[in-house]
Amino acid sequence: MNIRVNEVGPRDGLQSQGKTLTVDARARLIEALVGAGLNNIEAGSFVSPKAVPQMAGTAELFARLPAKERVRYAGLVPNMKGYQLATAAGAKVVNVVLSVTDTMNQKNIRMSLDETASVCGAVVERGRNEGVDVQAYLAVAFECPFEGLVDPEVVARYASQMNAAGATKIIIADTIGAANPAHVQRLLDLVIPHVGAEKLSCHFHDTRGMALANITAAVGRGVLEFDSSIGGLGGCPFSPGATGNVATEDVVLLLNSMGYDTGIDPLDLVPVVKLAEELTSVPLGGKSFRWLSQQYTKLRGDIRHGS
Ligand code: COA
Ligand code: ZN
């Protein structure tokens, strides 16, 4: 059975780095990911460069990404202006983010929960009319850093709402990495009757080291798509303890080992982790990275990145 691994390092990972990468460097990273077999990549966001300077120049980036039949590049947008910029830049997949608490939306995009829900709904509907896939992220779906534990019924309600509007995917996002496998099962058991497991994807951060366990729990409920970030790239240098998404190499190794087909060889990711390290000047690598690197050296020789 296939499970899709959706790479979000170039957006979720890079947006929180202390070092802002040039468009050229961002393109190199994405080219390396494509070369390693990633077919679904969140390449950047179309947001205010004042809010997130790391994502400035995403339109320019989209113009130079390698066009390949098998690869889908997504752009995250916070509002209709972002949707217009993304589609003008050629994005065929657009991600909207609906944080399921009021405070999180205010902090992130300066809108209330109601306003955000209506803006996301409008973007989803416009995408449906214009042949653009709009995927809806439900952020802080488990716990909000400002409001604490989130009522799963609220998540189920917004999942249904976005699904009814025509979102092509609903992504349950553990933005701060606070979920555990029992919580994942409880939440999915409430959401799946509304939207169906095949419509869902999950996005886990590894702050408490439970992301792989959470993925395993979600697989057990029939979820067949997961976000991850190369080398576990992410986290904020200004908030100690915050970590990035679950590492792509760990997710691929886990799923392949369990007998699922991700279409990716985890050894191909080793040089990409090295490249991401060099570009960001941050030490990277998931839980399996040391072992994968040893395997790589044994089977293929020196690790040369960027090839
Ligand atoms: N892309 C680029 N610029 C945008 C934009 C977009 N999607 N939406 C608004 N802007 C610009 C406006 O044109 C305006 O520009 P100006 O100052 O040159 O006139 C400026 O941003 C402020 O616009 P305003 O509507 O007043 O927004 P705001 O100041 O309340 O900020 C957001 C709201 C959503 C634009 C901003 O908070 C943002 O981009 N947040 C993204 C956060 C993010 O990426 N979080 C992580 C992923 S969820
Ligand atoms: Zn995230």
Image: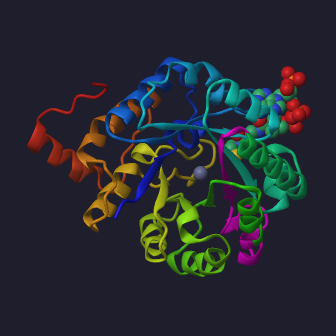
Instruction: Write the start and end of the magenta stretch as one range.
Output: 130-156
In the picture, measured across the screen, residue 126 lies left or right of residue 118, that is left
In the picture, measured across the screen, residue 7 lies left or right of residue 139, that is left
Residue 83 drawn at (x, y percent): 74, 35
Q: Quadrant of ligand 1?
A: top right
In the picture, measured across the screen, residue 176 lies left or right of residue 30, that is right
Residue 298: name its quadrant. top left
**Colour setup of the view:** rainbow
Residue 37: name its quadrant. top left
Assess whether residue 144 is covered by the magenta stretch.
yes
Q: Quadrant of the N terminus?
A: bottom left
Q: Quadrant of the C terminus?
A: top left
Is 105 or 75 nearer to us in this picture?
A: 75
Q: Is residue 153 above or below residue 67?
A: below
Is 208 or 299 nearer to us in this picture?
A: 299
Q: Residue at x 27, y 48 (%)?
A: 266
Residue 123 drawn at (x, y percent): 78, 44
Count of numbered marks: 0
Is 110 or 185 nearer to us in this picture?
A: 185
Q: Residue at x 47, y 73 (%)?
A: 222
Assess whether residue 112 is covered by the magenta stretch.
no
Residue 279 drawn at (x, y percent): 43, 27
In the picture, measured across the screen, residue 137 lies left or right of residue 278, that is right
Determine if residue 39 is in view. Answer: yes
Q: Is residue 64 above or below residue 69?
A: above
Residue 258 drawn at (x, y percent): 28, 68
Is 307 or 95 nearer to us in this picture?
A: 95
Determine if residue 50 is in view. Answer: no
